Amino acid sequence: MTSRWIWIFSQIARRIWFRASLFSVLAIATALVAILIRPYIPNDLPTKIGADAVDNILGIIASSMLAVTTFSLSTMVSAYSAATSNVTPRATRLVMEDTTTQNVLATFVGSFLFSLVGIIALSTGAYGESGRVVLFVVTIAVIILIVVTLLRWIDHLSRLGRVTETTERVEKVTISAMRSRRQRPYLGCQPLMCIADDVPKTAIPVFVSKIGYVQHLDTGELSMIAKNGNGRVFVRAIPGQLIDPTRPVAWFEGLKEDQEEKVRSCFSIGDTRSFDQDPRFGASVLAEIASRALSPAVNDPGTAIDVISRAMRVLAVWVEPNPDIENEILYPNVYVPPLDIADLFDDLFTPIARDGAGIVEVGLRLQKTFQTLAKFDRDRFRKNAMRHSVEALHRAELGLAFKGDKERIRLAAGAVGSEEA
């Protein structure tokens, strides 16, 4: 699986400052490259293409890009605020990691720095007449890039921070995490089905000194530690679980005690959960979006119904045809517990059934979804779908006042799991 350092770099690469810094360095280098190329430019070429106009063009770019960048930043802050208040605070990070927004801001900042460095170099005479030609050509290319970026930005602003757009982002990242776990149900390790039975009594527990969530588990490094020590590692805390100093995150057998710190370092712990290796977090965020939409202050059952459909697509990933790679064990000395399908059902449907108990259309959509999920012959889908169907029916009977609505929910619930459905 993904090593800890690669995961840390991927987290850094998603930050807005990283891409802006990268584009800024590239812009400065581009502005200075004309100094190196000028000896190869014919002497009479500057007068033919009017390279003297580059001074005014760079001045226009510098002043306009500063204003556009400031406007874009204020628009981003408004979008983040809208996502926090209208969707859920847990989804704001996905909006902040939007690549289109980051590329737009990085392009604007980079263009500003490019023009600024170009103006400074021109004022010092570093380019010369021949260097102005190269700078002029590059400036035209930068203008084209700015125009294309502005057109993309105008189109993207109409969707940034909206409920549907943000919900779609949550669905995509959850499906990605689900598909990754589907291909590697035990993160490439041996299955640990029952801790009480499978973990040897002689295994030494590994504790951590802080309270937080496991954001990433480096099973590859755990395998190296176990292989070098001719031992085995039994993992208890998988990504997404809350850990504390009172319960072990893992046990190791056959290793030296000085390797305990190495085992501990394979668990990346943070204050919040991460979407990458934790499909349940994405499921919980989807349920939060539906719960907020069902609150009396918002009263938007349409969004809740949309989330139910997305939840069905998320769970359907688990029954997708999968090659034999799912059974391939990359790290035989490491044992990892599986992802419980029952927990995913609870994360997705319990909050929606609870908060939408008094809305008949939400109850009907839930029962129809359970009808579909009950047909999936995979990992107790039928059992969990029927269990949640019964729970949602009981909640609806308590929440609905009209007798006809209750009867419709009962009929829909009765069809869950039946051959006629």
Image (cartoon, rainbow, N blue to C red):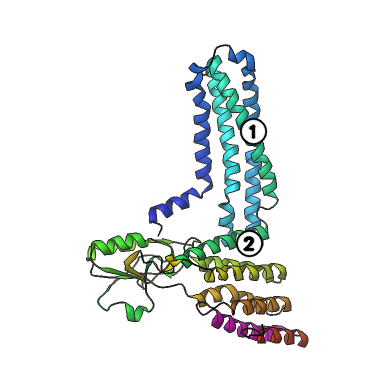
Observer-nearest of 380 and 215: 380
Observer-nearest of 186 and 10: 186
Q: Quadrant of the C terminus?
A: bottom right
Q: Residue at x 62, y 28 (%)?
A: 140
Residue 62 at least partly seen = no
Observer-nearest of 358 and 222: 222
* Element class at badge 1: helix
Residue carrying label 1: 144
Q: Locate residue 25 relative to residue 254 in the image: left or right.
A: right
Q: Quadrant of residue 103?
A: top right
Name the magenta segment's main secondary structure: helix
Q: Position of residue 324 (x, y in %)?
A: 43, 67
Q: Residue at x 57, y 20 (%)?
A: 133
Using the image, determine if residue 290 lies above or below residue 388.
above
Using the image, determine if residue 155 lies above or below residue 311.
above
Point out the stretch of residues depicted in magenta: 376-400
Q: Residue at x 64, y 71 (%)?
A: 308
Residue 167, label in figure: 2
* Element class at badge 2: helix
Q: Amino acid at mark 1?
A: Ile
Using the image, determine if residue 48 lies above or below residue 415.
above
Q: Quadrant of residue 263?
A: bottom left
